[in-house]
Amino acid sequence: MKKKLIQNTTEHFEKLFHDQAEHIFLSPGRINIIGEHVDYNDGYVLPAAINKYICFAISRNQNSECAIIAKDLNEAYKFDLNDELKPIDKMWVNYILGVLHQLKQRGLKQGFNIVFSSTIPMGAGLSSSAALECGIGYAMNKLYDLGLSKEEIALIGQKSEHTFVGVNCGIMDQFASVFGKKNQVIKLDCNTLEYEYHKADFKKYSLLLLDSNVKHTHLTSGYNDRRNEVEQGLAIIKSHFPEVKTFRDCSAIMLLVLKEKLGETIFKRCHFVVKEIQRVQDAVNALSNSDFIKLGNLISETHQGLSKEYEVSCDEIDFLVNAVANETSVLGSRMMGGGFGGCSINLVEKGSEKELIEKIAEQYRTTFGIELKSYKVKISKGTSEFKNLNYTH
């Protein structure tokens, strides 16, 4: 899969620019084992990079002109780095321009030609956008010696999404894309960006993603609404419990005391956040002890919270989670990502995947008339340069 992606991307570059690309970079998508919607709520998250990538074939120019070709979309965008960079009406371009806008302020002057292609499914909640932002940031840093740390590259990607795309995302996706390590999950403190790696050896289990193939349009508005609701909630909690600085200092008992003041909706949102922050800690312990039954239970509890309390699931994803609930080969299942569509992540027994996929796909097709997609994923390393250029010929 990776070899074919690299080959297709580099061949397309040669066809368009009549020369070999100087450099090849791979930037991965990510999964999040647990810790959903807490990256902007002072929580810990447990993401990992996966073996689905955006491949970038890049050569430098001798001037300030830039050409970016999105092979999969069959679209191109050309511009001059000396011109003012501002958002346009092509969303994929804005992820890139938002990064370049910041890099210009850090000394980027020279143009380039880029062809990129991807095996990260779009809209499945695997953070193809973060892979795009971080891949561009990482590549420019390497090509032009901008002296950026990995952390700075992740933050530049996040800021690009805030400023040029208009999604007020947390830092998790970009961080996982840049810092990923093979067979390791990252326990990330989203406040301080302190992180630690934990071995992710699932032994006789594997991670299976079931892609609902739907993306409901209220993702951005729903996401921004949730942020407002929890911010209101935290302000109320702080006014009654001055010792609370962040959701991490808050307990479920405090929330119960303030239930009336918070109101039903904001109480539910805050209750999910407080419980989810604890679940991440519990999941790290379960992984350390290879207690996969416990890990599976925590994953399933997260889904109930996301669906009933945070209310960011949808009928299709709830169906996929409920459909595997009684399968003995599945230890846990939940919605993953921002919500309102995308994938469910499932901890399943190795060898059971094919039969499970066939069974669920048929039920899903019968109920919704939608074809289910599925992806077996492995935990891989983060954004990197691919060195073996001979590998592509």
Image: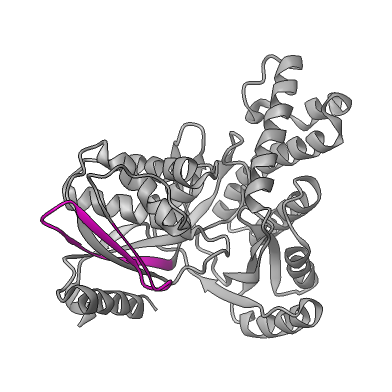
Quarter of the figure with residue 14: bottom left
The spot of residue 65 in percent (x, y) is 20, 55
Specify the segment rendered in magenta. Answer: 52-78
Figure check: 217 above or below 9: above
Name above or below for residue 261 compared with residue 43: above
Which picture quadrant has residue 169? Answer: top right
In the drawing, does residue 15 fall left or right of residue 216? left
Residue found at x 61% / y 77%: 373
Residue 276 falls left or right of residue 82: right
Quarter holding the C terminus is: bottom left
Main secondary-structure element of the magenta-colored stretch: strand
Residue 68 on the magenta span: yes
182 vs 95, nearest the viewer: 95
Residue 137 appears in view: yes
Colour scheme used in the picture?
one colour
Counting from the top left corner in percent of width and height, residue 382 is at 37, 57
- Residue at point 26%, 45% (across, down): 83
Q: Position of residue 245 (x, y in %)?
A: 62, 21
Residue ranking furthest to the left: 62
> In front: 149, or 104?
104
Closest to the observer, 101 or 78 = 78
Say whether residue 142 is left or right of residue 188. Answer: left
Q: Is residue 243 magenta?
A: no
